[in-house]
Image: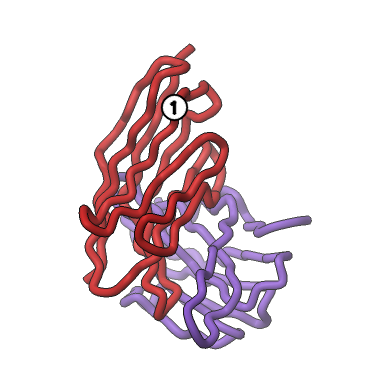
Amino acid sequence: ETGVTQTPRHLVMGMTNKKSLKCEQHLGHNAMYWYKQSAKKPLELMFVYNFKEQTENNSVPSRFSPECPNSSHLFLHLHTLQPEDSALYLCASSRAAGEGREILEQYFGPGTRLTVT
Amino acid sequence: GDSVTQMEGPVTLSEEAFLTINCTYTATGYPSLFWYVQYPGEGLQLLLKATKADDKGSNKGFEATYRKETTSFHLEKGSVQVSDSAVYFCALSENSGYALNFGKGTSLLVTP
């Protein structure tokens, strides 16, 4: 496997279910991200992990719970979601931010298409 | 705060036509600018980037020039192909962090 992979690619869940999205990167990066992509809206950054530590939570509801057990894996645990949470969830990775001016190019996975019924 | 505005789509062009997708930005500092492309059923791929004023990013026949005076980073291609049909996203990143601010995306459809 190369690049950034995400599983499952499609998920349908009821509002009372609990499910998890998985992301794995094979690029040797130390920063990982979750984005939400909804129709007609800009991509929304949800969470950022830098060397396994969460460094940004963009006011995301607590029904979304991220987990980063190591620099290669990122999970998004879902529970009691709402229909408006239906979207494409994208994972990305990059080198970690260091000192000085640098460009951190992000590499994206194919996404998980989530439908909440 | 920082933001990116790009032209609404969809944009429909015939093969070999000239493409321009407009992108303007608002930022407090000196951001880096990116164009990402998303093909159907796939994640976003970095298409090109520019890190300072007057830089020109280019890749696969696409070009964009960082214009600080007009706060713009318009995407151009001289002759589009059917395989260029995708959604194109303009984005910026302040160099003090690593969060990307994306525009809403512009859908491009190229017909034979």
Residue A83 visible to the viewer: no
Along the line of sight, which residue is nearer the eye, B106 or A62?
Answer: B106
User: Which secondary structure, mark 1?
Assistant: loop
Q: Position of residue A107 (x, y in %)?
A: 58, 59
Chain A is shown in which shade? purple
* Residue visible at 25% across and 38% down in the picture: B8
Residue B69 is drawn in which quadrant? bottom left
Q: Quickly name the residue at label 1.
A: B78
Location of residue B76 by image quarter: top left
Depth check, front residue: A72 or B26: B26
Q: Residue at x 60, y 80 (%)?
A: A68
According to the colouring, which chain is red?
B
Task: From the viewer's perspective, tell me whether residue B75 is left or right of residue B71.
Answer: right
Tell me the quadrant of the picture where the N terminus of chain A can be found.
Answer: bottom right
Q: Position of residue A41 (x, y in %)?
A: 29, 51
Relative side of B43 to B33, left or right: right
Q: Amino acid at mark 1?
A: Gly
- Within-10-Å neighbours for mark 1: few <14, some 14–19, many 20+: few
Visual colour scheme: by chain
